[in-house]
Image (cartoon, helix red, strand yellow):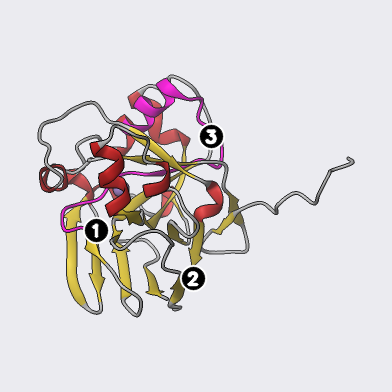
């Protein structure tokens, strides 16, 4: 094929336990999916889930045992961490029913929905899209993907984030307002999910700012933990 320029290489995330990699198609994110975080952002109640996106090439792969450099983005003075369970879709579909939704999951990973909070808040108050607040280079650090069959207890796992060794966020996956199956069902009503889609499922309470030099450690019980240093 006579490309005008060389196409960008596929964005991939390693799969634990072998040499396979997961090719990323799209990155979807769920907003306000833990009650205490919804409250800290000024909301309450079980409103229908809402979604936003990040570019696929915002992925930063965080390998086990390494502290991955995470460049501080431009334009912001308030870069926030949001630790999240990431669902890796292996089988696509549209209007997926809740009771079969987990059959579409290839695996799970730990992710960070990095957020330019000052810009996001400005965009919220002006009723503008969140693209610049949520979607930027290096906005989606993610650990290796664990196949779903290897983590049967994922839906009751603990989710944690610390900064420089201090606990900042703690929650339970069971506290998701919309669980993984419900999230897949709702998202697939809006979009045809494709193999390679990643879904960041939302963050528990305790989001806050990081600055260059800070080390973020994020974990979900049973998954490959991640560590990043803001540079
Ligand atoms: Mn988030």
> Which residue appears at 43% of the width and 19% of the height?
95
Say which mark, if any, is on residue 159: 1
Q: Give me the C-alpha separation between circle 1 and circle 2.
A: 18 Å
Question: Splitting the image into 4 quarters, where does residue 179 fall?
Answer: top left
Quick one: quadrant of the N terminus? top right
219 w.r.t. 57: above or below: below
Q: Is residue 173 magenta?
A: no
Q: Badge 1: how crowded within 10 Å, few (<14), some, or many (20+)?
A: many
At 54% across and 47% down in the image, what residue appears? 56
Going from N to C along the chain, the mark reached first, 1 or 2, is 2
In the rendered structure, which segment of residues is drawn in magenta? Answer: 183-207
Q: Is residue 156 left or right of residue 229?
A: left
Ligand 1 within 8 Å, label 1 CB: no
Q: Which residue is mark 2?
A: 63
**Can you tell which mark lies on residue 91?**
3
Residue 192 against residue 140 in the figure, above or below: above
Asked if disc 3 and disc 2 are in contact, CB closer than 8 Å, the reply is no
How packed mark 3 is, by other alpha carbons closer than 10 Å (few <14, some 14-19, many 20 or more), is some
């Amino acid at each position: 094929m006579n490309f005008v320029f060389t196409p960008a290489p596929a964005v991939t995330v390693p799969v634990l336990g072998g040499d396979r990699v997961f090719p990323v198609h799209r990155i979807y994110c769920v907003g306000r999916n833990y009650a205490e975080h919804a409250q800290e952002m000024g909301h309450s109640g079980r409103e229908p889930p809402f979604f936003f996106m990040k570019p696929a090439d915002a992925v930063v792969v965080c390998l086990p045992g390494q502290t991955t450099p995470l460049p501080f983005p431009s334009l912001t003075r308030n870069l926030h961490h949001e630790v999240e369970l990431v669902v890796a879709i292996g089988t696509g579909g549209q209007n997926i029913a809740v009771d079969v939704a987990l059959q579409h999951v290839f695996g799970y990973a730990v992710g960070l929905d990095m957020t330019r909070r000052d810009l996001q808040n400005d965009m919220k108050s002006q009723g503008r899209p969140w693209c610049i607040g949520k979607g930027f280079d290096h906005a989606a650090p993610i650990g290796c993907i664990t196949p779903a069959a290897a983590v049967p207890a994922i839906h009751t796992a603990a989710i944690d984030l610390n900064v420089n060794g201090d606990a900042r966020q703690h929650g339970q996956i069971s506290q998701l307002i919309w669980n993984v199956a419900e999230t897949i069902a709702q998202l697939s009503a809006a979009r045809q999910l494709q193999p390679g889609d990643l879904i960041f499922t939302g963050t528990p309470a305790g989001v806050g700012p990081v600055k260059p030099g800070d080390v973020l450690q994020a974990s979900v019980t049973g998954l490959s933990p991640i560590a990043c240093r803001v540079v």
